[in-house]
Structures are given as structure tokens and as C-alpha cells.
Amino acid sequence: MRGRCDTPSTYFAVLASVLLAVTGPARSAETGAMTVGDLREFCIASDAGSKSACQFFIYGVVQGVRLAAGVVGDKTHFCIPDDLSSRTMETIVKQAIGQDLMLFPADRDLDASGFVGAAIQKAFPCDRRAPARRAQ
């Protein structure tokens, strides 16, 4: 048994599994999915358990996005630095939640995993203006 994916269909199956696990289908707050409001509550709570839940949820989403992007070789949408600390991830997401909910309070019902992915992507945009290579 090998430790990696050797066929395109295996790559696709792994990618689909990771993306579904990370983002899940579009769901509302009524279905039990973690919402932005739920994540905010974990992140601002004073107890260690809630703080850990906040940090590990964010870390898990970012790692899932990073893994999925790596599997498909996507270097145009997700350019997350390899040395990004979990503390920095948490700070970025908490600031994004605070700023967003001040302007759009109804966003508290959005899916938290999608919000985390978008916040990290916005914080680390890929350079889409890379110069074209000349043929030699």
C-alpha cells in the first residue's frame, strides 16, 4: 500500500472528501452547522475550552483548504504562507468577524468554515500579476 494518491481518480476522490469535510454543502443556521455567530462566541469566551474550540476550528479549516489546494495544485486562489502560525490565523479571523458583523449583522448566520476560508484568502491574496515568461 502506498502513502499517496497515484491516479487522477484517487486525487479527485481525496479532494472531494476534503472539500466536503471542510466547507460542507451550503447550510443555514437551522441545520446545525457552525455559524459565524457560533464561532464568534467561542472566540470571545473566557474559558479555555471555548478558546481552544475557536483556535482548532480555524486551524482545521485552514489546514483543509491548504491540503485541498495542494492536492489540485491550485496556486492561484490559496496562497497561505507555510509558516503561518495558528495564533496569526486566529487573529486574522477574529478581526474579520468583528469588522464584518459591525457592517452586516445578519452574516452571523453564515457558515463559519466558508467565512474562515474567505478571511484567510483575503489576508493572503495570490499575486495574479506575475510576469509572463518569455520563450527562449
Image (cartoon, grey):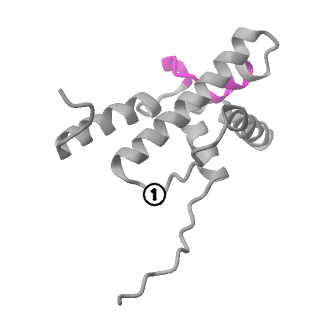
Q: Residue at x 67, y 30 (%)?
A: 108
Residue 35 is inside the magenta segment: yes
Residue 112 place in picture, x, y as percent: 59, 30
Quarter of the image where the C terminus is located: bottom left
Q: Decide whether residue 40 is among the magenta residues.
A: yes
Please, is residue 48 above or below residue 125 in the view? above
**Viewport quadrant of the N terminus:** top left
Local crowd size for mark 1, using a 10 Å CA cut-off: few (<14), some (14–19), many (≥20): few
* Image spot of residue 46 (x, y percent): 82, 13
The residue tagged 1 is 75
Residue in the picture at 47% in, 60% down: 76
Q: Seen in the image, is 15 located left or right of residue 60?
A: left
Magenta segment's dominant SS is helix
Q: Position of residue 135 (x, y in %)?
A: 35, 88
Label count reads 1
Residue 21 lies left or right of residue 123; in this view the side is left
Residue 59 visible somewhere in the drawing: yes
Q: Is residue 111 visible?
A: no
In-front residue for pair 66/33: 66
Q: Is residue 80 above or below residue 32?
A: below
Compared across the picture, whether 71 is left or right of 107 comes to left
The segment highlighted magenta reads: 29-41
Quadrant in the picture for residue 34: top right
Spot occupied by residue 129 in the image (x, y as percentages of width and height): 55, 74
Q: Residue at position x 74%, y 23% from top? A: 43
Q: Secondary structure at mark 1?
A: loop
Spot the residue most to the bottom.
Answer: 136
Which residue is found at the position 52% from the left and 27% from the top? Answer: 28
Q: Amino acid at mark 1?
A: Lys
